[in-house]
Amino acid sequence: MAVSFNLKFVIVDAAREALHATPFRAFKLMLHDGSALRVRNPDDLTVTKGGWIIYDDGKTQRFLNPAMITSVDTPSSAR
């Protein structure tokens, strides 16, 4: 008997939403160790169908487990 686990992380949905926002606004991925990855343009981030998040800003490339991301910090829409 095959066992299938389908974990869904809210962080993945939040990252997708920030990535596809119109107009795009830079945002940060806050990591469990207190560091932050700034997503300056949509080309910096990929969210796979499987829920993995790939960050590549041209200098740094990281494959992120969504469980290690504490928040997706987007700019406030009210200024």
Image (tube, rainbow, N blue to C red):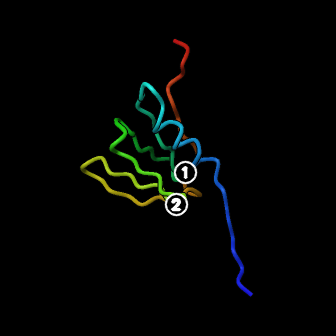
Q: Position of residue 19 (x, y in %)?
A: 46, 39
Residue 69, numbered circle: 1
Assess disc 1: are there few (<14), some (14-19) or many (≥20) residues with their C-alpha within 10 Å of its C-alpha: many
Which residue occupies the extreme bottom position in the image? 1
CB atoms of marks 2 and 1 within 8 Å: yes
**Horizontal side of residue 79 vs 26, given as left or right:** right
State the SS at label 1.
strand
Residue 65, numbered circle: 2
Residue 18, compared with residue 55, is above or below; it is above
Labels in figure, total: 2
Q: Position of residue 41 (x, y in %)?
A: 34, 36
| Residue at x-position 69% and y-position 70% | 5
| Residue at x-position 57% and y-position 49% | 12
Cα distance, mark 2 to mark 1?
Answer: 7 Å
State the SS at label 2.
loop
| Residue at x-position 37% and y-position 39% | 42
Of 20 and 18, nearer the camera is 20
Which residue occupies the extreme top position in the image? 79
